[in-house]
Amino acid sequence: MEHKMKLQNKPFLAIKKGTKIIEMRLRDEKRRLINVDDTIEFENQETLEKMRVKVNRLYIFSSFEELYEYFPKEILGYEKDEPASFKDMEKYYSLDEQKKYGVLGIEIEVTMW
């Protein structure tokens, strides 16, 4: 199954470069349909460039705080010298949404762009 998602420019480029291998999303109804071996087509919101990735593994957490504690920040898309905080995700997903749905770490690998 193929899913479509939009991404900001910075995480899009980090995935393309191969440094970001965990995409973080709310585990809402749409994301619950994602399975291992599915394909995701990401579209860069700035440039409209597209790339496809394969889903290798799914990680389910109750909050982004829990997810950030589990993974090294570099594979989440942060630079080594860049501060990383689970609060960064609150601009996209409220605490109420996180409590309601939980969150998802999607381990991916680029297949084509």
Image (cartoon, rainbow, N blue to C red):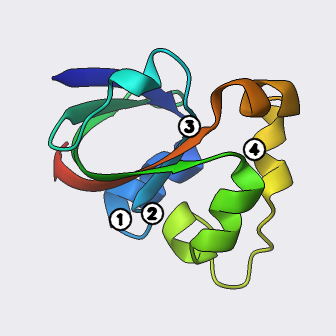
Q: Is residue 8 visible?
A: yes
Three-letter code for the amino acid on which mark 1 is drawn: Lys
Question: For the residues marked 3 and 1, what is the alpha-carbon distance in whole angstroms?
Answer: 20 Å
Q: Earlier in the sequence, mark 2 or mark 4?
A: 2
Name the mark on residue 89: 4
| Crowd class of label 2 (few under 14; some 14 to 19; many from 20; radius 10 Å) | many
Sequence-wise, which precedes: disc 4 or disc 3?
Answer: 3
Q: Nearer the viewer, mark 2 or mark 1?
A: 2
Q: Can you identify the residue that label 3 sits on? A: 25
- Residue 20: give its label: 2
Considering every residue shown, the one lying at the far top of the view is 29
* Residue 112, position as x, y percentages in the image: 14, 45
Which residue corresponds to the image point at 49% horizontal and 15% vertical from the top-left?
29
Residue drawn where x is 56% and y is 75% of the image: 74
Please name the residue that numbered disc 1 is placed on.
17
Give the distance between the C-alpha atoms of the residues marked 2 and 1, in whole angstroms.
8 Å
Residue shown at 42% from the left, 70% from the top: 19
Q: Is residue 113 above or below residue 31?
A: below
Q: CA distance from mark 2 to mark 4?
A: 15 Å
Q: What's the distance in space between the residues labelled 3 and 2, CA to CA?
A: 14 Å
Q: Residue 31's x, y, as percent?
A: 44, 25
Amino acid residing under circle 3: Arg
- Labels 3 and 1: the sequence-earlier one: 1
Q: Amino acid at mark 2?
A: Lys
Q: In this rendering, is residue 27 above or below 86?
A: above
